[in-house]
Image (cartoon, rainbow, N blue to C red):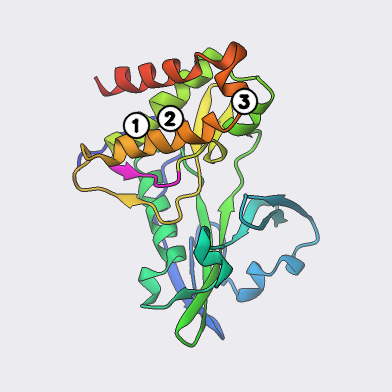
């Protein structure tokens, strides 16, 4: 697949190393941290932390040696969560959700795409099951599209930026299966896409996943009254027009 880049995002050199812990493995970027241990993924390890919710469970903004990170455990969604909130069936470390998201984000950053930089992931095994946590570099001064819609603060140029950014991801074959308004962040007219758990690259980037991604985002917006009525009612047309123009 040809390299298609865009956005003011630094290029990641895709360095990654793996170390063993007492109960699993840690995959990390050695340019961010040196000799990580499982304590790095324990929220009590940090004196400065801020709790947030990602819709499924608690995550935290933390500070470590002057670096601003997001520490986020993995939680299941849907009906299966009633049976197991955090555990997944183990079939190999490289197949875990944590390793796959870390490596995917590194690939996307190497293409200059506007996604958060992964710092490290920890996979903890327990018999045939595993759980895990990811640490990401914090994106500063951003607001989710959902919050902007709720407050009726989305500008026309921001709708267009979101459309262009989604088109850029699709040109690179990125299938974001949970593309909702909470996973789109904006800093003025600069858009970022987050939460790539369960996502991947499609060999056929003309596939129907593009349509399904857009439909998923549209459904999440339609749940908000402010999107369907008033000054934001034309937002989806602006977004899709920018998407089509970028793909033309």
**Magenta span of residues:** 173-178
Q: CA distance from mark 3 to mark 2?
A: 31 Å
- Per the image, the residue denoted by label 2 is 7
Check contact, mark 1 vs mark 2: CB within 8 A: yes
Q: Which mark is residue 225?
A: 3
Which is more foreground, mark 3 or mark 2? 3
Main secondary structure type of the part rendered in magenta: loop
Tell me if I can see residue 85 in this picture: no
Q: Nearer the viewer, mark 3 or mark 1?
A: 3
| Quadrant for the N terminus in the image | top left
Label 3 residue SS:
helix
Q: Is residue 24 left or right of residue 199?
A: right
Mark 1 against mark 2, which lies toward the viewer?
Answer: 1
Q: In the rendering, which numbered label is found on residue 156?
A: none
Q: Is residue 126 above or below residue 231?
A: below
Q: Eyeballing the image, is 34 above or below 201? A: below
Q: Position of residue 59 (x, y in %)?
A: 66, 56
């Amino acid at each position: 697949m040809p390299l298609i880049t865009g956005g003011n995002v630094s290029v990641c050199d895709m360095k990654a190393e793996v170390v063993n812990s007492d109960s699993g493995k840690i995959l990390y970027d050695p340019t961010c941290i040196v000799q990580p241990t499982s304590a790095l993924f324990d929220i009590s390890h940090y004196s400065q932390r801020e709790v947030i919710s990602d819709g499924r469970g608690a995550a935290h903004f933390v500070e470590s040696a002057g670096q601003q990170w997001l520490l986020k455990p993995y939680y299941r969604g849907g009906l299966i969560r009633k049976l197991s909130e955090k555990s997944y069936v183990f079939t190999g470390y490289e197949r875990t959700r944590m390793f796959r998201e870390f490596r995917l984000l590194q690939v996307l950053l190497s293409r200059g795409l506007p996604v958060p930089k992964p710092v490290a992931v920890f996979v903890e095994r327990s018999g045939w099951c595993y759980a895990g946590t990811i640490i990401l570099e914090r994106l500063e001064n951003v607001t989710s599209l959902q919050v902007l819609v709720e407050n009726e603060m989305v500008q026309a140029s921001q709708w267009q930026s979101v459309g262009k950014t989604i088109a850029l991801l699709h040109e690179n074959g990125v299938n974001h299966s949970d593309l909702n308004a909470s996973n789109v962040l904006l800093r003025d007219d600069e858009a970022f896409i987050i939460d790539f758990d369960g996502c991947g690259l499609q060999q056929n980037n003309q596939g129907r996943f593009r349509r399904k991604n857009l439909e998923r985002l549209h459904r999440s917006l339609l749940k908000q009254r402010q999107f369907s009525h008033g000054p934001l009612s034309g937002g989806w047309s602006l977004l899709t027009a920018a998407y089509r123009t970028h793909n033309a």
